[in-house]
Image (tube, rainbow, N blue to C red):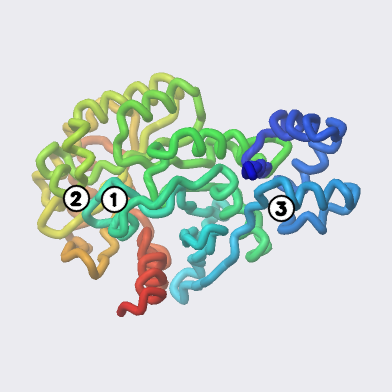
Amino acid sequence: MEKVEKADIKSMTLKELQDWLGQQGEPAFRGKQLFSWIHEKFVSSFDEMTNLPKTMREKLMGSTIWTVHQPLQVLTSQLDQTKKFLFGLQDGNVIESVYMQYKHGNSVCISTQVGCRMGCKFCASTLEGLVRNLTAAEMLEQIYSVQRITGERISHVVLMGSGEPLDNFYHVLKFLKLISCENGLHISQRNITISTCGLVEQIRQLAAECVQCTLALSLHAPDNETRKELMPIAYRYPLQDVLDACRYYFEKTGRRITFEYSLVAGINDNKQEAVKLAHCVRGLNCHINLIPVNPIKERDYKQSDKIKIRQFKQTLETFGLQVTVRREMGRDIQGACGQLRRSFIKQQAGGN
């Protein structure tokens, strides 16, 4: 007997949902009702959709994928009230999301993949490799679940959790359309940051879509050789090609580029590196975000001390660059990408 593929309704735009329901013999206005329950009211079950006929709800239960994440762990930082969520997916995989409170609003850092294949040396997300991409629904549901649990509205989203967003380009683009949809949560794309280790073709492709998101490039080194030591993707894409793609993104979108630079003691944190970095990004409309690397026990990288970080920042500022040092959040709750997921996987396997 041929298996009937279920429809992923939470990943559908309003038009796609209306068209699909039309094929099921339902009137177009049901599409707006269903879309509202999913993307405005964030319900966790069909039973809550009280203005839909019971027969329709029962039909939806049998013919659709209903993506709702189960929180396996919720850790709250005693330092800054950051919350880290470990969500269980319907196929048994687990992903992480982080809820952060700022003066400008509430932000959620979401995962875009289960695991990652980019191999960045200071990141726990990549230690288990890539399992699979997340769907648009699985990305959205991280935000919807956090809203349901905290009772707080999310105003900012960062695609910087586990995974390389641009390695999951199709589903990320669908996610952007849905999260910014005026009939949904309607988060401005200007409040969305997409992090990438530097996939040149996809950066250019994203620019061609004329999105209004902030592009955050994980730079982490001012030259190719040091970058190769930290990020294997540098073997595929020379630094100059990555920077040219960033310039193209700015030209197409008008959005200032953010350069993420993790400071690793003895690797990329001396004054000479700061000067090279300043020359590297000269002429680019950019902001540099210095990140004291969050140590993970599987690597021997150490965080730069506060004096080194301050000197690095001051050196960049002498070149007229805008520089901030990222506020460390959730360090007491395994705040770095992939740490909580990895601990859970090892625990499930009976490891230490």
Give whichever of 85, 62 is nearer the camera: 62
> In front of the other: label 3 or label 2?
3
User: Percent from the top left, x then y, of residue 51?
Assistant: 90, 49
Q: Could you tell me the amino acid type at mark 2? A: Phe
The quadrant of the rendering that contains the N terminus is: top right
Eye-nearest disc, 1 or 3? 3
Q: Residue at x 36, y 66 (%)?
A: 342
- Tell me the number on the disc at residue 290: 1
* Crowd tier of the residue under label 3, counting other residues whose Cα lies within 10 Å: few below 14, some 14–19, many 20 or above: many
Tell me: 135 left or right of 149. left
Find disc 2 in the rendering and name its residue.
312
The answer to whether residue 299 is above or below residue 181 is below
In the image, residue 328 lies at what x, y percent? 37, 62
At 45% from the left and 24% from the top, the residue drawn is 253
Q: Give the residue type at disc 3.
A: Phe
Q: Position of residue 260 (x, y in %)?
A: 31, 45
Query: Looking at the image, can residue 136 be seen?
Result: yes
